Amino acid sequence: MDSLSYNTARRLRFAGLLTLVLVLVLDLFASHKPHFAEYGFTLDALPWFYPMLGFLSTVLLVVVAKSLGILLCRKDHYYASE
């Protein structure tokens, strides 16, 4: 990898992490109202609930996609004529 693409990747990683930290800090100052309090569910009023829910949902989607990729993959010689 040449230095230009390395620097670009490093800057993009830094910008992504900076955006993540900014969103998490701003989430601390947002007002959180429980939307499902009448059902006894008040976790959504906690700070960082929705960022953590989004992160865990993304991790779950990646795990399911990787598992499906392994489960549904074909052998290398599947389309080879015999």
Image (cartoon, helix red, strand yellow):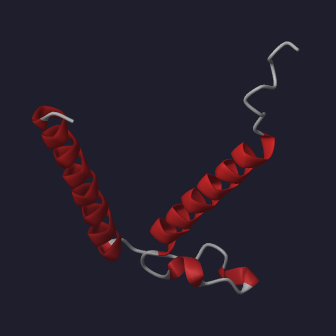
Residue lying at the far right of the rendered structure: 82
Q: Residue at x 50, y 75 (%)?
A: 49
Question: Which quadrant of the structure image shows residue 72?
Answer: top right
Q: Tell me if 61 is positioned left or right of 24 in this view.
A: right
Query: Residue 2: x, y in percent?
Result: 15, 33
Q: How many marks?
A: 0
Say whether residue 13 is left or right of residue 75: left
Quadrant where the C terminus sits is: top right
The one nearer the camera, 16 or 70, is: 70
Up the image or down, 79 lies above or below 12; here it is above
Place of residue 9 in the rendered image (x, y in percent of width and height, measured from the top left)? 22, 42
Q: Residue at point 67% right, 76% down?
A: 36
Residue 56: give x, y in percent of width and height: 56, 66
Q: Residue furthest top?
A: 81
Point 71% across, 53% down: residue: 67
Quadrant into which the N terminus falls: top left
Does residue 7 lie above or below 46 as drawn? above
In the image, is residue 76 above or below residue 65? Answer: above
Residue closest to the eye, 49 or 13: 13
Compared across the picture, whether 74 is left or right of 61 comes to right
Q: Nearer the viewer, residue 33 or 48?
A: 48
Place of residue 10 in the rendered image (x, y in percent of width and height, measured from the top left) = 18, 48
Residue found 61% across the figure and 84% down from its top? 42
Seen as rendered, the residue at the extreme front is: 82
